[in-house]
């Protein structure tokens, strides 16, 4: 299914939904850095780029991806080498 544009459609749809919800930044953990760069994401230079109010809200999330992003103890460390990327909408 590679190179059929399915990933592009999914990402653009999710970004549209985020905009509709009023989200201003979207992050991802990925091995596909070039793919997400083509969609406007940037590799995060500062891994603590979340302000304290947002951090406290994210701590309540049950999403393991959020937990990994924040390096919370309930998930294993990022030993797979995923890249953290962010996009401002």
Image: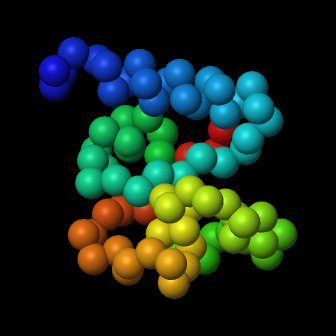
Rendering quarter of residue 81: bottom left
Residue 69 shows up from this direction: no
- Toward the viewer: 65 or 31? 65
The image quadrant that residue 53 belongs to is bottom right
Q: Is residue 23 left or right of residue 63?
A: right
Name the spot of residue 75 as percent of width and height, x first. 44, 75
Q: Residue at x 27, y 47 (%)?
A: 32
- Which residue lies at the image location 66% right of the left edge and 48% below the top edge? 25
In the image, is residue 84 above or below residue 74?
above
* Residue at (43% x, 62% y) in the render: 84
The quadrant of the image that shows the C terminus is top right
Classify 36 as above or below 85: above
Q: What colouring method underlies this structural image?
A: rainbow
Farthest residue in the top direction?
A: 4
Percent x, y for residue 48? 60, 77
Q: Relative to 82, does residue 70 appear above or below in the rendering?
A: below
Q: Is residue 73 visible?
A: yes
Q: Is residue 28 left or right of residue 60?
A: left
* Residue at 76% across, 32% down: 21
Is 67 left, or right, of 32 in this rendering? right
* Depth check, front residue: 36 or 59: 59
Residue 24 location, quadrant: top right
Q: Is residue 8 left or right of residue 68?
A: left
Q: Furthest residue to the right?
A: 53
**Residue 56: horizontal and vertical position, in percent?**
78, 72
Question: Residue 65's spot in the image, x, y percent?
Answer: 49, 59
Count of numbered marks:
0
Quadrant location, the N terminus: top left
């Amino acid at each position: 299914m590679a190179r059929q544009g399915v990933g592009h459609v999914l990402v653009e749809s999710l970004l549209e939904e985020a905009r509709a919800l009023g989200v201003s930044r979207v992050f991802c953990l990925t091995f596909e850095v070039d793919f997400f760069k083509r969609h406007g994401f940037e590799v995060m230079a500062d891994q603590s780029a979340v302000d304290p109010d947002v951090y406290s809200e994210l701590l309540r999330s049950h999403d393991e991806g959020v937990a990994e992003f924040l390096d919370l103890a309930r998930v294993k460390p990022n030993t797979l080498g995923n890249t953290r990327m962010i996009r401002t909408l």
